[in-house]
Each structure stands twice: as C-alpha cells, then as structure tokens.
Image (spheres, rainbow, N blue to C red):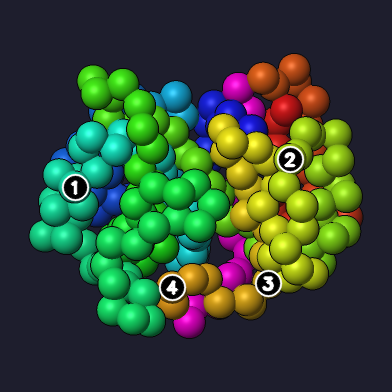
Amino acid sequence: MNFAKVTLQTSVLEEMTSFYQNVLNMPLRECTQHSFTVVVGRTLLTFEQSSKKPFYHFALGIAESVFNEYAGVIKQHATILPSKDGEEIMRSVTWKGKQLYFEDPDQNILEILAFPTHPAATWLCVQEIGMPVLEVPAFAERLSMIENEFSPESASFRFYGDQEGVLVLVKERRPWYPTDRRASLHPIDVELASATGRVIEFVKEQLPYRIVF
C-alpha cells in the first residue's frame, strides 16, 4: 500500500508548518492560508486548517543511515514518548528497525521508522496511518478490494496493507501505544500511488475517511 498522498487536519497550522519544514526538514511543496503540503519521500503529506482539535497517530519511514541524526534533532524540539520501560529508541516488531515515538505541535503521536536504503535517501514515505474504526473486522471487509498481506492480530487491532505501507486499524478508544491516549475519529483522506480513480467512502459507517485506490 504505497501512499501517494495523505491529508489530515490541524488546529495549529502555523506551528505545524514550521515544525514539519524546519524541525523534520521536509521540503515544503505548497503553503496557503488554510493548508500546507510537505514531501515525505514518495508521499505528499497535507495538513488542512480545522476549527476542531484533531488527533492522529502515524509513522514515517526514514533511512537508517540518518535515523540517529534526526532522532537527536527531534529530541531537542519535541516531546518524546518512551516505552513503559523508559526506552526512547525502540525496535519495531513489524519492521525490525529502530523506532522513535514523539508528539508534533498538535500533539499527534508520530513515529519514525528506520529502513535500510540508499545512503543518499532521507525521508522515505508515510509508512503507517492509524485509522480508528467502530468495528475492525467489518471495516477490513470494506477494504477487501485493496490487497493485504497481514493477518488479523485481534478483533480490536490489525495492520491492513503490505510492506510498502499499512492502515493501522484499531477499535475506537483503544489506547495508542506507547501512551494511554485513546484513538478517536478525525478526517483522513488517502490516495494510493496505484490509484485508478476508484473511491471508498464510509458514509454508511459514519466515518470521516476517504480512500482513492
């Protein structure tokens, strides 16, 4: 599941623009009065201004060769979210590389994931997008037109996608690791790189999501 574009919302547009451009060092593709877009490797990440305070959890792939450098910068400018054992740098069970959890200015839970790659690379992609749902099995069934290689882990949590990227499906109000903050529903718009123009919207499910595939 190669994410070409991901659109989320924010209540602090200026602070988010500065953080993603100047702290995370992501190239700014577009900036308007109501939104901004940065380049995360092969993914465009857009934040749109919202009058509400949204809350997301997502992961960004980064080259293993620059992980420690970027982790050091993030530690200086963001709140780090350690494991229950106090570890800041952890190892991903799924992706096997180093990982670091932290908050951006809107208090979203972010994660950087290290992957072996060409040494000239830095940011690779949006690798994971947390998508809270009312019922995980039923939502996964709605995604059946999109290829998936992960088996369900439980009735309240599963990865849906492949090695290129995943939707992290969790039951609403399930805590996001490594915190006690509960997952909540906020608008998410996703366009896959292989998109043919087909769209899944979740109006009947009363979920604010849209996937172009």
Bounds of the magenta segment: 180-193
Report the side of 105 relative to 201 (left or right): left
Amino acid type of disc 4? Pro
The CA distance from mark 4 to mark 1 is 20 Å
For label 4, the residue is 178
Label disc, if present, on residue 68 of the rendered structure: 1
* Relative side of 84 to 141, left or right: left
Sequence-wise, which precedes: disc 4 or disc 2? 2
Three-letter code, disc 3? Glu
Residue 42 image position (x, y, % from top left) = 44, 24
For marks 4 and 3 on the same chain, the one whose residue lies earlier in the sequence: 3
- Left or right of 126 in this view: 25: left
Q: Is residue 11 visible?
A: no
Q: Main secondary structure of the magenta part?
A: loop
Residue 91 lies, in percent from the top left, at 39, 58
Among the 4 quarters of the image, the one containing residue 134: bottom right
Please tell me how crowded label 4 is: few (under 14), some (14-19), or many (20+) other residues with Cα within 10 Å.
few
How crowded is the residue under tag 3: few (<14 C-alpha within 10 Å), some, or many (20+)? Answer: some
The answer to whether marks 1 and 3 mark residues whose Cβ atoms lie closer than 8 Å is: no
> Crowding at label 1, few (<14), some or many (≥20) Cα neighbours within 10 Å?
some
Q: Residue at x 45, y 49 (%)?
A: 96
Task: Specify the quadrant of the image occupied by residue 201.
Answer: top right
Q: Nearer the viewer, residue 161 or 108?
A: 161
Q: Which residue is mark 2?
A: 149
- Circle 3 is placed at which residue position? 172
Image quarter of the N terminus:
top right
**Quarter containing the C terminus:** top right
